[in-house]
Structures are given as C-alpha cells and as structure tokens.
Amino acid sequence: MYSYICGIIKEIESDAITVEQSGIGYRINTASPYSFKKDEIVKIYVYQYVKEDEISLYGFKNIEEKQLFLKLISVKGVGCKMALPFLASDHSQIIEAIDNENVNFLKKFPKIGDKVARQIILDLKGKLVTCQNTNLIKTEELEEALLALGYKKGDINKITPNITSNNLEEQIKEALKLLLK
C-alpha cells in the first residue's frame, strides 16, 4: 500500500496525472488534474484501489482531502469514481450539506441519487467538521481518545464542533477544557 508519491508531473489528462519517480510513471486519478503543472515536483497522497479486474491510484493534494475521500468511500454505495468529484468542490460546503441534511446539494454530484445521498448523510453526519481555515478534522480519533478517558459520547458530541485545532494532541487539550466547564 502506498501512502504518498513524490515525483515530477509528466502528463496531465482530463481525469488523471502521471507522476514520474525513479523512471516509473504512476497514473494517478485526481479530482482536479488541471490544478497541477507539468514538470512540477509534487508530493501526492495516494489511495490504492485493488479490485479483481483493476488496480488504480487516487491522488490528493493533502492528507485532509484523502481523509474526506476515505470517509466517502466508506459509505455503502459510494465507490472511488463516485467520491472523486466531491473533492473538486469546496470541502466545507460538502460537510455543511451533510450536517444540514441537504440531500439536493449532494444529488448535484454525478451518479448520486436520493438513496445514496441519504446514506452519505446517515453515515457521515457529525463525523466531519470544518475549522477556521477549512481544513478537515477527523473527529473519530478525538472521540475515541475522550471515550477512553471516561467521557460520555453525548458530552463529546456537544463540544466537538467547537474544536478548532488540526493536531490531535491540541484537539484533546481543547476538548478537555470545554468538557471541564
């Protein structure tokens, strides 16, 4: 399994880029291939998809984007090709639509119907939050840490939207301050 690939962008296609590293060209599917420049040196976070008749790489500019993608493909009925277009739009709008149960917004994405949109909301509502600089925070790790410290899930859910840090250690400190109030 690959975590990331550093290399030089050699080709840009409508749905993918080719990154050359050590003489090997890796074709990486990405949501916004034209946001990259040819001959640019990049670090691309990747997800390797392996299926009976296919092995593909999906690439992301940062770890937060990759985490959102992984959350989306964890939803029943959402595959890699369905999740990729979500990453081309503003992540905070997607998270807001999920949290506000805005089915119509989610249905604007290709191949997302009413049933899949409702499943995305059901599975992801409250699990992704935005902070001031619109980076994604993975709340599950924070929740697990606080549960291990003996706090109740209901109390944790009340304070997680107020957490602004990206670092798990800082998130825990912020959460503890909020929980002790």
Image (cartoon, helix red, strand yellow):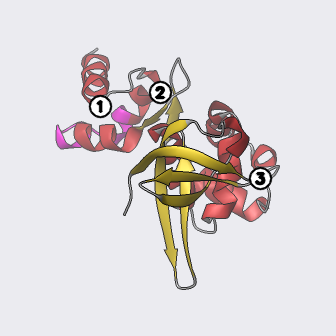
Residue at (40% x, 39% y) in the render: 139
Q: Is residue 93 left or right of residue 131?
A: right
Q: Position of residue 56 (x, y in %)?
A: 55, 67
Of badges 3 and 1, nearer the viewer stands 3
- N-terminal of the pair, mark 3 or mark 2, is 3
Q: Is residue 101 visible?
A: no
User: Does the CB distance between marks 3 and 1 fall below 8 Å?
Assistant: no
Q: Disc 1 designates what residue?
A: 168
Is 142 above or below relative to 69? above
The residue located at (53%, 44%) in the rendering is 8
Q: Earlier in the sequence, mark 3 or mark 1?
A: 3
Q: Amino acid at mark 2?
A: Pro
**For numbered disc 1, what is the local secondary structure?**
helix
Q: Which residue is mark 2?
A: 161
Of callouts 2 and 1, the N-terminal one: 2
Residue extending furthest toward the bottom: 52
29 on left or right of 123: right
Residue at far front of view: 23
Residue displayed at 37% across by 44% down:
140
2 vs 1, front mark: 1
Q: Nearer the viewer, residue 111 or 157?
A: 111
**Amino acid type, mark 1:** Leu
SS category of the residue bearing label 3: loop
Q: At 36% from the left edge and 64% from the top edge, which residue is drawn?
A: 1
Query: Vertically, is 109 above or below 136?
Result: below
Horizontal and vertical percent position of residue 18: 60, 54
The magenta region covers 147-156
Kind of residue at disc 3: Ser
**What is the spatial separation of the Cα atoms under label 3 and label 1, in whole angstroms?**
36 Å
In this rendering, would 176 be left or right of 115?
A: left
